[in-house]
Image (spheres, helix red, strand yellow):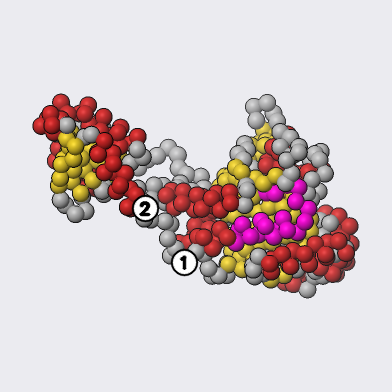
Amino acid sequence: MNLISKRIRGMQDILPGESEKWEYVENVLKKKSKLFGFKIIRTPVLEHTNLFERTSGETSDIVKKEMYTFLDKGERSVSLRPEGTAGVLRAVLENGLHDGNLPLKLMYVSSCYRYEKPQSGRYREFFQFGLEIFGGKSALADAEVICVAKSIFNDLGIKNLELEINAVGCKECKSAYNKALENYFIVHKENLCELCGDRLERNPMRIFDCKNDKCKNICKNAPTVLEYLCAQCALHLEHLKEYLEVFNIKYRVNPHIVRGLDYYTKTVFEFIINSGEAPLTVCGGGRYDNLSKELGGADMCAVGFGIGLERLLLIMQDQKLSFGGNSNIHVYVIPLGETCKNKSIEISQRLRNIGIATEQDIVGRNLKSQMKYANKIKCDYCIFCGNQEIENNTVKIKNMSAGNEFTLNLDEDFEKYFLNLTNSKLQ
Ligand code: HAM
């Protein structure tokens, strides 16, 4: 085929067959989060670029290398969102959602865009399921978002995910830690890559994001943030550990997690799977108590996480997990002649009105091809509607898996019959 355009590198089409799996997973995510009181928010895919510069951090890889940024027709710099948190916080502040409503619990499914090198589990367009709690100061809020993530993974049946937590401190501990990092990395400056040389001057913590093997090795012996936590941040971490124990959630403190975004304060955490060549982070999050004020908004603490849906689905496929059985009944209605077409439409509508997926021919197939098509789409029942049936106010029904045929009256028993079938399939 000589198509004039093809899919953009790093972006995926989610086709029927796959899309049902996405629907199933998204439903589990939303249902579980609703149990904890989260409500859905939707924000625009485009934001003014300065929002992400201020939130992700000008020295972060996301802002420096990965954003899809361009001038719109009004010469304003806009960017496709690289992550969900910034836009959600902007929307909360702009719409005053927090006024008198704290704690505010929001969830979203957002397409995100990062110009990264595509590989398995890493795309340029990907989908994040995210949760944010605004106004929860206690470490219980951190533990609660972690618990939602854990419960989601349990509901989906995912095994072997490890929770790693850390603290990155507040402004005070960060500045002491940055000083210590500077002193450490300066000794190794010559062996750092060019980008990390720049990071050393602007934001030494970002050196931990580097994928260069030499830099990674140097990072191994770098001082850890835990040694520089102030009393309040250290206590917050202790409280988080206690709450995780109450929730019965296993964790490991990994002092090397710093996360790729600059807005975090105190808690950071990741759920990681170690099944492939390299560990894969499925869920990342943490607390960001200063971001609202930095955006010009209220003094409002916040904590949340993002789960990469592609990665979640990859793991589920790897672990051969179920994406939920199909509990829907699918019916195909076949008119036995032109004069019966309108009656078929009426019958199809009656079934759709009670929630039964129903199709009929719309491309002019003859009777034989319609039967073939009904087999191809693997419908559960075929309904035949001929002149004689119309006269008797009945239809003929064929159970496609059992092969038997029977007649049904088109009175209210008709709907009852299909509703009963659905109920028994659901049980
Ligand atoms: P993040 O760690 O940058 O955090 O992204 C969250 C998740 O998105 C990752 O754990 C991963 O599963 C997925 N992800 C990231 N980049 C890609 C990619 N290129 N391809 C596929 N999946 C990817 C955030 O974005 C924060 N907003 C999370 C957060 C919410 N923190 C507080 N609230």
Q: Which residue is mark 1?
A: 319
Q: Residue furthest left?
A: 388
Q: Which residues are magenta?
A: 132-150
Q: Amino acid at mark 2?
A: Leu
Q: Which residue occupies 21% across, 29% down? A: 343
Q: Which secondary structure dominates the residues rendered in magenta?
A: helix
Q: Position of residue 163 (x, y in %)?
A: 64, 66
Q: Quadrant of the N terminus?
A: top left
Q: Position of residue 245 (x, y in %)?
A: 69, 69
Q: Is residue 340 magenta?
A: no
Q: Residue furthest bottom?
A: 221
Viewer-proximal residue among 423 and 198: 423
Viewer-proximal residue among 292 and 198: 292
Q: Which residue is mark 2?
A: 426
- Measure the alpha-carbon separation of dots 2 and 1: 25 Å
130 horizontally vs 49: left or right:
left
Viewer-proximal residue among 173 and 147: 147
Q: Quadrant of residue 99?
A: top right
